[in-house]
Amino acid sequence: MANSVKLGMFITGTDTAVGKTLVTAILARSLKELGLDVGVMKPVETGVVKGRPSDAVRLARAAQVSDSLDFVRPYAFRLPVAPLDAAKTERQTIKIPTLMRAYRQLQAQHDLLLVEGAGGVYVPITPTIDVLDLIEKLKVPVLVVGRAGLGGVNHAMLTLNALRERKIPILALVLNQTVPAKTAVARRQERSTLELLRESAGVPVIGPLPYMAGVDARFARYDWAVGKLAANSEMKKLTKLVLASVRGTR
């Protein structure tokens, strides 16, 4: 969109492996199909192994962008630990100005830039900066992704309250089924998590999104899952919510 305000949005999680990348990828594809020029960014990615699908590449595929991977993912490390420790292991230093330059470069090229964090809000990036600090520096609203099952209420509320303490705008909370609910007890735990958070979160609660097996294995399976979940009624709600937020700030 010519002469439009360039916007950003940060996707964080209540924990690691809660489905942040999948939700970000679905949003990128869905918003692009609605005519929005969407960019993606994963400032720091750990657990990157040559020959295996990476989160940054998955996001770029979903958004169908040709932006340089050096901007989409300024830092990549092999060890699957917190960014600070992963960088130390490879005797590197993550520089916040480098992340900010990459963010501004991508932001200038797209109507909306979706930025996916690493783990949760208190994950350290440098000795003095964590994910929460980075969000604050970017000055963007946040979408929180959490797990639908047992423990989901506590983790979600801790994350939401941490963001509120910094007066960071929260767009919504998305609950994801990270493991299949095979028993009656597991299904009841999911319903309880959803009901309690809808009562107490203070933001729109989306989900739960259904469990998708094997999405980390290969690109074809991941692309299939993104397409399938894009048609999910809860993801459609989220897409409309994000689109309305974008249009409301123009």
Image: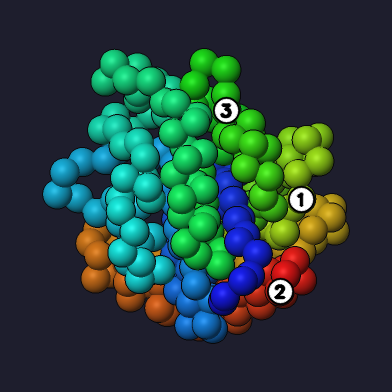
**Residue ID for mark 1:** 169
Whether residue 222 is situated above or below residue 167 in the rendered picture: below
Q: Residue at x 74, y 35 (%)?
A: 162
Identify residue for label 2: 247
Of callouts 3 and 1, the N-terminal one: 3
Count the marks. 3
Q: Can residue 155 be seen in this view?
A: no
Local secondary structure at mark 1 = loop
* Nearest to N terminus: mark 2 or mark 1: 1
Question: Which residue type carries mark 1?
Answer: Pro
Identify the residue at image location x=75%, y=66%. Answer: 249
Position of residue 25 measured from the top left corner of the image (x, y, whole percent): 44, 64
Query: Where residue 246 sits: x, y (%)?
Result: 68, 69
Q: What residue type is labelled 2?
A: Arg
Amino acid at the residue labelled 3: Asp
Q: Which residue is drawn at 35% across and 36% down?
A: 75
Horizontally, is 100 left or right of 175 in the view? left
Spatial CA distance of label 2 from label 1 is 16 Å
Which dot marks residue 130?
3
Is 180 on the left or on the right of 134, as rendered?
left
Task: Place residue 80 in its image quadrant.
Answer: top left
